[in-house]
Amino acid sequence: MITLSTILSDLPILLPFHYPLRLNTLSKVVFQRKSDSHSIIQEDAILPSSFTQHPKLRDMTDKLQHILKLSSNFSASYLLCHLEMSARSKLLHQHPSQRLLRHRNMYIRHIIADLAKHLPPSSTSPDTALPNSNIIWTMWNQGEDEAPLVIQQCIASMRQQGATVIVIDDTNIHGYIGPYADSINRGLQNKSISLAHLSDYVRFTLLGLHGGLWLDSTVLCCAPLPDCAFRLPFYTYRQSKYTNPNNPEVWWKAFVLGAHGPSALFDMASRILVSYWDHYDVLIDYYLVDHILNYLLSLPDYSNFKTQIPSEVKNIYWLQQHASDDWKDVDSDSLCFINKLDYKKLSELQMNDDTVLSHVIHKLGLTE
């Protein structure tokens, strides 16, 4: 049984920034699975309000609460794996070992496979689909007019593609996907689901119901999209390089996903997410959507989708990585037809009219 006193007695091992070598002592703590007990976190696990009065203590409080949630939802072996991966990443700036990745990914896959056996009913039907699947979906929850300039420029570049662009926000979302599932509402209310992860549910549900092409609002279109983006049963930006080192099996980009018409694959992905939040109240991995897609794309009905998608060689992150460099004519050879940006990181860069991103934005006619 985990109590706050247990956690605080081992406080150094839960702060890997300062005490990485004592991580192994965590194995002395006894954890129980959520399925075995619903009283894992006792009442004294509520942290005192004095913990939140200092930024560093508030950050520590968040870490402790997160660990408590992980311990009440998942196995001790997964928790130890999670802590070791965090310590390697944040303290040693190392990628996790292949052994850890295999253990973590197999554990998550087992959870997803179990959820897939007991899914809520599908809401997809021909009657719910929009008549035109030549749609680009994107999302900015506060509304396009409230988005940062670079987001507005990305959306404007999508409108140059000749497709219908629908910008999802909190005023129109339910008109396209209906009311949120109860588990999604619950996760939003208790802040287990962030806006970023709400968009995962939204993209899966939209593509399941209507099809079309989902682009994150941080995707800048620099050239015409290929016709197959709207014609394949599953589309993404497929490239063999620049994959997520924490999940080497991933060959797709979750910020570029498409389907021709209502999609059984994305409908199932949406229902797995709903079921996940029915059973758990903490995100097991930031890239949960990749784990879900990895499971689904291994099923016999969908395992051939990869071979139908053209393979791309250009780095979709190149523009972000070189945004503040001085523009050279040869740079045009490195640009993809779509480019993933990070508007928060861009805001920290020093740029002028001669830098790469400024040149590209001007060339596309997206300047103010």
Image (cartoon, rainbow, N blue to C red):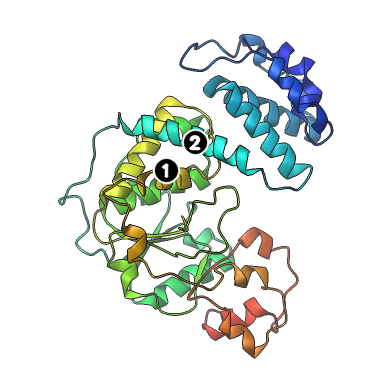
Mark 2 vs mark 1, CA separation in Å: 12 Å
Q: Residue furthest right?
A: 18
Work out whether residue 343 or residue 73 is closer to the camera in this orientation and state it. 73
Q: Which image quarter holds the N terminus?
A: top right
> Does residue 69 lie above or below 343 as drawn?
above
**Image position, residue 95 (x, y; %):** 68, 48
Residue at (62%, 38%) from the top-left corner?
A: 100
**Image position, residue 351 (x, y; %):** 72, 75
Q: Earlier in the sequence, mark 2 or mark 1?
A: 2
Q: Is residue 275 left or right of residue 329?
A: left
Q: Is residue 69 visible?
A: yes
Residue type for callout 1 = Ile
Q: Is residue 17 left or right of residue 146?
A: right
Name the element at disc 1: helix
* Label 1, residues with CA under 10 Å away: few <14, some 14-19, many ≥20: many
Q: Residue furthest left?
A: 127
Residue that mark 1 sits on = 292
Residue at (46%, 72%) from the top-left corner?
A: 156
* Label 2, residues with CA under 10 Å away: few <14, some 14-19, many ≥20: few
Picture disc at residue 346: none
Work out whether residue 242 or residue 153 is closer to the camera in this orientation and state it. 242
Residue type for callout 2 = Met
When asked about the image quadrant of residue 367, the answer is: bottom right
Residue that mark 2 sits on = 106
Name the element at disc 2: helix
When asked about the image quadrant of residue 99, the answer is: top right
Q: Which image quarter holds the C terminus?
A: bottom right
When asked about the image quadrant of residue 120, the answer is: top left
**Image position, residue 62 (x, y; %):** 68, 31
Work out whether residue 130 or residue 72 is closer to the camera in this orientation and state it. 72
Residue at (73%, 11%) from the top-left corner?
A: 5
